[in-house]
């Protein structure tokens, strides 16, 4: 394994994995770190992944992706 990387990404949740994928596709060497046992172990994401954006990262993702639940309601909340 290389000892130097162009980019080091901390956290293998949805954003970290997407950042690592885009960076690697751009030809840079990437180290993706996750302290949990698996990617996204401490997932703090409570939103949705929009199809057009996800399709740019993983073309035709819907052909193999398991659907956990369909979106039935959208809401925006602010904490102060």
Image (spheres, rainbow, N blue to C red):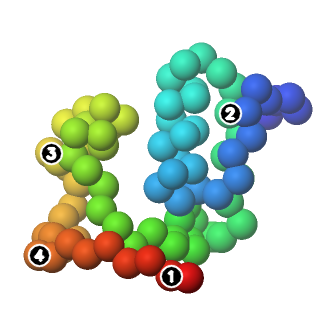
Is the residue marked by circle 1 packed among few (<14), some (14-19), or many (20+) residues within 10 Å? few
The answer to whether 35 is drawn above or below residue 60 in the figure is below
What count of labels does the image hold?
4
Q: Position of residue 25 (x, y in %)?
A: 51, 23
Kindly identify which residue carries mark 3. 63
Kindly identify which residue carries mark 1. 79
Is the residue marked by circle 3 packed among few (<14), some (14-19), or many (20+) residues within 10 Å? few
Q: Earlier in the sequence, mark 2 or mark 1?
A: 2
The reply to whether dot 4 and dot 1 touch (C-beta < 8 Å) is: no
The reply to whether dot 3 and dot 4 touch (C-beta < 8 Å) is: no
Q: Position of residue 31 (x, y in %)?
A: 71, 40
Kindly identify which residue carries mark 2. 30
Q: Earlier in the sequence, mark 3 or mark 2?
A: 2
| In this view, the mark in front (4 or 1) | 1
Q: Position of residue 42 (x, y in %)?
A: 57, 74
What's the distance in space between the residues labelled 4 and 2, CA to CA? 37 Å
Q: Secondary structure at mark 2?
A: strand
Q: Earlier in the sequence, mark 4 or mark 1?
A: 4
Q: Earlier in the sequence, mark 3 or mark 4?
A: 3
Kindly identify which residue carries mark 4. 72
The answer to whether 18 is drawn above or below residue 75 in the figure is above
The answer to whether 62 is drawn above or below residue 6 in the figure is below
Q: Quadrant of the N terminus?
A: top right
| In this view, the mark in front (1 or 3) | 1
What's the distance in space between the residues labelled 2 and 1, CA to CA? 34 Å
Name the side, left or right, on which 70 lies relative to 26. Answer: left
Q: Earlier in the sequence, mark 1 or mark 3?
A: 3
What's the distance in space between the residues labelled 1 and 3, CA to CA? 37 Å
Q: Position of residue 29 (x, y in %)?
A: 69, 26
| In this view, the mark in front (2 or 1) | 1
- Considering depth in this image, is 45 or 28 the residue closer to the camera? 45
């Amino acid at each position: 394994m290389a000892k130097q990387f162009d980019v080091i990404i901390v956290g293998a949740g949805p954003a970290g994995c997407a950042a690592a994928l885009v960076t690697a596709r751009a030809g840079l060497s990437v180290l993706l770190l996750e302290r949990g046992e698996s990617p996204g172990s401490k997932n703090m994401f409570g939103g949705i992944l929009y199809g057009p954006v996800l399709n740019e990262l993983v073309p035709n993702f819907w052909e193999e992706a398991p659907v956990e639940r369909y979106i039935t309601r959208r809401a925006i909340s602010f904490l102060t």
